[in-house]
Image (tube, grey):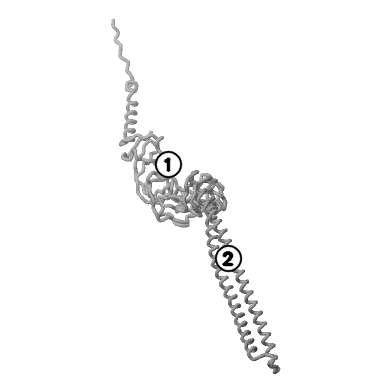
Amino acid sequence: MDIVKTPKQIPLYRRYWYAPLLVTVVIATTLIASKYRNVSYLASSDSLLIDAVVAGDLSVSVRGYGQLASRDVHWIGAETRGRVSRILTKPGDQVTAGDVLVELVNPQLLQDLKDAELEFAARKADVRASQVARETQQLDLKTEAANAEIDHQTAKMDLDAKTDLMSKGMQIISRLDYESTQLSVQKFKQRWEMQLQRVVQSREAMLATQEAEQARLSQTENELQKVLDQVDNLKVRARVEGIVQEMNLELGQQISRGENITRIARPDQLVAEVQIQELQVNDIQIGMLAKVDTRTSEIDGVVSRIDPTVIDGSVLVEIELLGVLPQEVRPDLNIEANINVAHVADTISVRRPVFARPNTTATVYRLNESGDIAERISVRYGEASTNFIEVLEGLGVGDRIIVSDPDSFNTHDRIFIR
C-alpha cells in the first residue's frame, strides 16, 4: 500500500533568508543616495590642495620678489673717442678706484699729442728768446741811465768848482763859461731823469709783454694737457671701489665720447627693491619691519621708500637692510621679502585659497567628515597675509576646505572626491 508522507515544514527565517540582506541593501542604497544626492562632479584628491582651519595668532605679511640693488651706483662713460683694444674686467669683478677697466686706441689722438708737444716746445722757446731780448734791452737802458748819471755828476762837479772860484772873486772863469756849465748840468740831469723813466717804462712794458706771452704759453700748455688727458682717458678707469655690474663691449667696437661703458655698484650700500601688487601696497607704510630672504640667509630690514608709480599692476618698495650683511649678498641678487603689516591675536585662519582677498565674502568648498564630499559654502574673510587669511564667518576650527584653484568645478555645488 502507498504511504502518505507529510511535507516537512521549513522555518520562515530559512525560507526568507534573503530578506535582511535585501533590507540592508535598500537601507545602504538609500543612505548612499541621500549622501551623494546632488553630487554632479568627480574630482581626484591628487589634484586638490586641502587645508584645515586652525586657531591662534595671525601675522599679516605681504610678500614681494625683487633684487638687491646698490644705493650708490656709478656709471663709467668714455671721456674720449676710440676703438676697444682690450677688455680687462668682467661683470662681477671686484675693482678699486684707479683700476683699468677697458683700453681704447685712437691713432689720430696720438698724432694730435705729438703736434701739441711740438707746438708747446716751440712756444716755450719763443717766450725764452723774447725774454732774453727784453732783458738785454733793459740792460742797455740801465747802462744809458748810468752813463747819463755819470755825465750829470761830472758836470755838477765842474759847476761846483767854478762856483767856488766865482765866490772867491777870482776872474779866471768868464761869465759865459760859467753859465754854459750851469746849462750843461741841467741838460745832463734832465737826460739822466729821462733815462731813468725809460728804464721804468721798459720794465713795465717787459712785465706786460711777459704776462701776455706767459698767458699764450699757458694756453698752449693747456691744449697739450687736454690732449694728454684724452690719451690717458683711452684707459678707462674705475673711479670708485665696487663690483662691475655689466660690460657689454666687444673687441674692435667703436666708442663715442660720453658713451656708457659700465657701471660699478658699492657692495656695502645695498637695499632690497621688491615688487608688490598694487592692491597689497596700500597696507604698507614706511618704517614697517621686513625679512629679506636670499635663499641662503635671512636679513632684517625696514621699509624706507614706496615708489608712487604703478607699473604693470605692481609698485616698487625699497627695503633698507639692517645689521651686518652676509658674504653672499651682491647687487642684482634675486631675493624674496616679507613685510609685516599687522598682527591679529586669538583668531582662526586657514591657508589662503586661490583668489581670496582680505575683508571680502567669497565661496569655498568644505569637506565632510569622511573627506569624500565637498560642498560649496559662503565665508567672510578678515585680514590676510601672503599665505594665510583670517576667517570671520562660515568656518570653524578643524573644518577642511579646498584651497587650490576651483576653476574646473566652480559651477557645481557639491563634488565627489575619490
Q: Please tell me in which quadrant of the rendered image residue 50 appears.
A: top left
**Disc 1 residue crowd, few under 14, some 14–19, many 20+, Cα 10 Å:** some
In front: label 2 or label 1: 2
Please identify the residue farthest to the bottom as the structure is shown.
Answer: 169
Residue 13, visible in the rendered structure: yes
> Which residue position is annotated with label 1?
51
Give residue 133's position: percent from left, percent from top.
Answer: 59, 67
Q: Residue 209 versus residue 71: which sits nearer the camera?
A: 209
Q: Residue 240 versus residue 5: which sits nearer the camera?
A: 240
**Disc 2 residue crowd, few under 14, some 14–19, many 20+, Cα 10 Å:** some
The residue located at (34%, 31%) in the rendering is 28
Badge 2 amino acid: Ser
> Which residue position is annotated with label 2?
130
**Mark 2 or 1, nearer chain start:** 1
| Above or below 26: residue 2 | above
The residue located at (34%, 42%) in the rendering is 376
Q: Of helix, strand and loop, which one carries label 2? A: helix
Give residue 94's position: percent from left, percent from top.
Answer: 56, 48
Residue 322, visible in the rendered structure: no
Measured Cα–Cα span from mark 2 to mark 1: 98 Å
Quadrant occupied by the N terminus: top left
Badge 1 amino acid: Asp
